[in-house]
Image: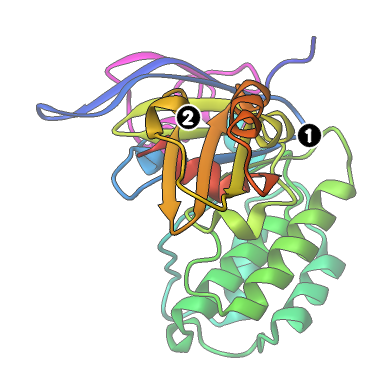
Amino acid sequence: MSTPALEIRNLTYRYGRAEALHGLSLEVEPGECYGFFGRNGAGKTTAIKCLLNLLRPNSGTVRVFGLDPARDEAAVKSRLAYVPDFVAFYPWMSVREALDYQASFRSHWNADLESSLLRQFQLDPQAPSSGLSKGQRTQLALIGAIAAEPDLLILDEPTSGLDPLVRREFIQTVIGAYQDAAPGRRTVFVSTHLISEFEGLIDRFTVLDQGRALLTANADDARSRFRRLRAEFSGELPPDREFADAKSIRRDGRSLELIVNGNGDAVLERLKACRPMNVQTESLTLEEIFLNSVK
């Protein structure tokens, strides 16, 4: 077994009397793109700050590549790059100077990749960083993170402030290319509320709510378990009690929609026994799975 890229065990963190994380556990394998999903205030950023030794947990353990970020901070941070949800640069620096400053801390820097990303994002290297928009600051931070070609990329709402076209291009092209360049080694840990835009990249994920992990699953397994069943009837709809084991039931005229988790075949048989005119089934997207998990 390879050493996990990230390992969190029974992590607890409190702000005064308010508990932001309660017994959080998760494990991220090398080469994965791991989604960390939750509403605002769920505890996602707090967990990331514990991983980066920006916060000290009240209890529990955190390991990055098997190392303790508190004891081996330099060794840990030399192998990762972090893009927070709010990005700032020294205002007297140009784009070029900001990137050179970041590169000075790295033993490896892909200058060709940096130039390619500057062109892709249409950023002027001579532009002052103080004049960049929020989206452009995020783009600059992403360039610095990717050009370092770290083993681990930690992203906290990485596409915040980017317009939809740039978001899609970044997610599909940049992050995909970053991982494809070293399959099985480069790992992405992404905290985001734009779940649908990462749909094709996420391998596994955790849904966090009020500091607790509600669901941890392989993305493909989750899609096979969470299903939507739709049926249309010519007459009266069957009563809800027939489908008490469904996660949700929605009625719309002569149509009945059920959301199921893991028991889809059994519920489908009961639905067919009610003699609908037609029945359709489909897997839920990761965003729909998230929404049904936090209800």
Residue 188 relative to residue 252: left or right:
right
Amino acid at circle 2: Ala
Q: Is residue 226 magenta?
A: no
Label 1 element class: loop
Residue 265 relative to residue 88: left or right:
right
Label 2 – label 1 distance at C-alpha = 35 Å
Front-most of residues 245 and 205? 245
- Can you see residue 4? yes
| Quadrant where the N terminus is found in the figure | top right
Q: Position of residue 280 (x, y in %)?
A: 69, 47
Residue wearing tag 1: 31
In terms of image quadrants, where is residue 97? bottom right
242, above or below 10, in the image: below
Residue wearing tag 2: 246
- Most extreme residue toward the left is 17
65, above or below 138, in the image: above
Front-most of residues 79 and 32? 32
Image point (68%, 37%), residue name: 223
Image point (60%, 57%), residue name: 196
Magenta segment range?
48-75
Front-most of residues 274 and 231? 274
Amino acid at circle 1: Gly
Q: Is residue 73 magenta?
A: yes
Number of the front mark, 2 or 1: 2
- Label 1 crowding class (10 Å Cα cut-off): few <14, some 14-19, many 20+? many
Q: Position of residue 183 (x, y in %)?
A: 89, 39
Q: Are marks 2 and 1 in contact (CB under 8 Å)?
A: no
In terms of image quadrants, where is residue 5? top right
| Quadrant where the C terminus is found in the figure | top left
